[in-house]
């Protein structure tokens, strides 16, 4: 019997995916759970696996195609005697000469009309399109993405290094070109447009982080602990939300004639904004209100690495109670972060700067950090938000008892 393998639903907000790579060849025998192809959604890059053992008898997609959830991707025959593979929209690249190499990994199928091994090269669809426009041979580009995958930035760097100029995708008086948004950028655009529909306001507060930096230094010397400032902020933020539960609520719009409601959960899951070459991703640190710092730090390190390598699962980027966004590493003093739809608050963190401040009827130079708390005005008023921000500042200036 022939079974169609479809693009699964990978989160409520995921509606489509782009085929990044094919892991098997036409006619290949696969076992249940074997990866068949790699898909990039607006949340993550993930493998679609075989639901059963069988023989690959057809592909309904090729690398670079964007398909909707539920669309058939691969056809498997799970019978004892599989029929001969039927003609499919993709051909099989020769294994020995087109990238299978010593590892024995199957060569990637190539599109009709493509040269041998054309799709043995791992490259993002937008990178492939840019390579055509810029006249760059992908075979000569070193990929910096996960497992050597070529990114748009790699192609643009290669074009720049050889002195090439961008080729316009569409002729125009100024020589401009049109470039499609990646799946991640489309998701960011969609969510930030939705964010602008939320009545939100921002509160700023300067915090003396003398004690916080000393605590980071002290805690980092403990065995098996690699605690950073962000880990301390995550735990203090979770503590603050415990005392101000409205910041952990979610606004539920009116439906079917009912009045708007607030949804309240249990505990605090903190989203951590991470800049990647695919755009901004927000992995979620779970149960920040109850976990010790060493666990939070280890989880942060793992999630940030996975985000930058394109290995985050959809479940690792959903369900945050509140988000934390820091641009301190870029020298930004303060900024207003936009709310993620579904969350009531987001904390923006600026860099730490030595400033002259009044102290004990004199002047002192102390390290200061600016925190900006953006809030959903449908749930939180100014006084409530100011009280929460004041409590957070008090914790960071010496009032926090860390769970180590």
Image (cartoon, rainbow, N blue to C red):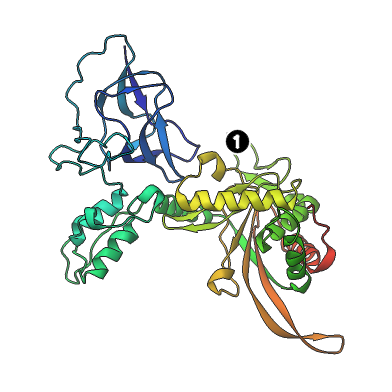
Q: Nearer the viewer, residue 261 or 70?
A: 70
In the orientation shown, which residue stands out farthest toward the bottom?
Answer: 362
Image quarter hosting the N terminus? top left
Mark 1 element type: loop
Quarter assignment of residue 332: bottom right
Quarter assignment of residue 174: bottom left
Q: Nearer the viewer, residue 9 or 284?
A: 284
Q: Position of residue 262 (x, y in %)?
A: 69, 43
Determine which residue is flagged by label 1. Answer: 257
Tell me if mark 1 has few (under 14), some (14-19) or many (20+) residues whose alpha carbon lies within 10 angstroms of its own.
few
Q: Position of residue 72 (x, y in %)?
A: 32, 27
Say if residue 169 shows up in the picture.
Answer: no
Identify the residue at horizontal 39%, vertical 33% (top origin): 69
Answer above or below: position of 238 versus 72.
below
Answer above or below: position of 360 versus 159.
below
In the orientation shown, which residue stands out farthest toward the right?
Answer: 360
Identify the residue at horizontal 37%, vertical 38% (top origin): 38
Quarter assignment of residue 159: bottom left
Identify the residue at horizontal 56%, vertical 67% (top origin): 327
In the orientation shown, which residue stands out farthest toward the left?
Answer: 113
Q: Position of residue 270 (x, y in %)?
A: 65, 50
Identify the residue at horizontal 25%, vertical 23% (top origin): 27
């Amino acid at each position: 019997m022939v079974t169609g393998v479809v693009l699964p639903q990978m989160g409520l907000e995921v509606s489509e995916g782009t085929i990044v790579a094919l892991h098997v060849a036409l006619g290949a025998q696969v076992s249940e759970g074997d990866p068949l192809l790699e898909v990039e959604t607006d949340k993550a890059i993930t493998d679609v696996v075989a639901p059963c053992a069988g023989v690959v008898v057809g592909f309904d997609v090729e690398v670079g195609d964007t398909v909707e959830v539920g669309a058939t991707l691969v056809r498997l025959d799970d019978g004892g005697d599989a029929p001969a593979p039927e003609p499919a929209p993709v051909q099989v690249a020769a294994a020995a000469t087109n990238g299978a190499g010593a590892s024995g990994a199957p060569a990637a199928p190539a599109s009709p009309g493509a040269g041998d091994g054309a799709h043995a090269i791992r490259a993002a669809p937008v990178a492939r399109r840019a390579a055509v426009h810029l006249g760059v041979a992908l075979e000569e580009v070193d990929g910096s993405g996960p497992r050597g995958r070529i990114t748009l930035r790699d192609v643009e760097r290669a074009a720049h290094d050889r002195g090439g100029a961008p080729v316009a995708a569409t002729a125009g008086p100024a020589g401009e070109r049109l470039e499609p948004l990646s799946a991640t950028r489309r998701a960011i655009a969609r969510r930030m447009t939705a964010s602008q529909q939320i009545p939100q306001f921002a509160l700023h507060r300067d915090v003396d982080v003398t004690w916080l930096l000393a605590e980071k230094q002290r805690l980092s010397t403990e065995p098996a602990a690699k605690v950073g400032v962000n880990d301390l902020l995550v735990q203090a933020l979770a503590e603050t939300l415990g005392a101000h539960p409205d910041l952990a609520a979610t606004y539920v719009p009116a439906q079917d004639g009912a009045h708007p409601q607030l949804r309240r959960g249990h505990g605090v899951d903190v989203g951590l904004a991470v800049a990647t070459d695919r755009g901004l991703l927000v992995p979620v640190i779970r149960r920040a209100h109850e976990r010790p710092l060493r666990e939070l730090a280890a989880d942060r390190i793992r999630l940030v690495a996975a985000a930058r390598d394109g290995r985050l699962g959809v479940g690792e980027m959903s369900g945050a109670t509140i988000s934390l966004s820091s641009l301190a590493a870029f020298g930004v003093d303060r900024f207003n972060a936009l709310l993620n739809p579904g969350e009531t608050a987001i904390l923006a963190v600026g860099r730490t700067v030595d400033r002259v401040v009044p102290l004990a009827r004199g002047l002192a130079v102390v390290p200061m950090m600016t925190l900006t708390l953006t809030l959903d005005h449908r749930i939180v008023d100014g006084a409530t938000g100011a009280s929460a921000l004041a409590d957070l500042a008090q914790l960071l200036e010496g009032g926090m008892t860390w769970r180590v």
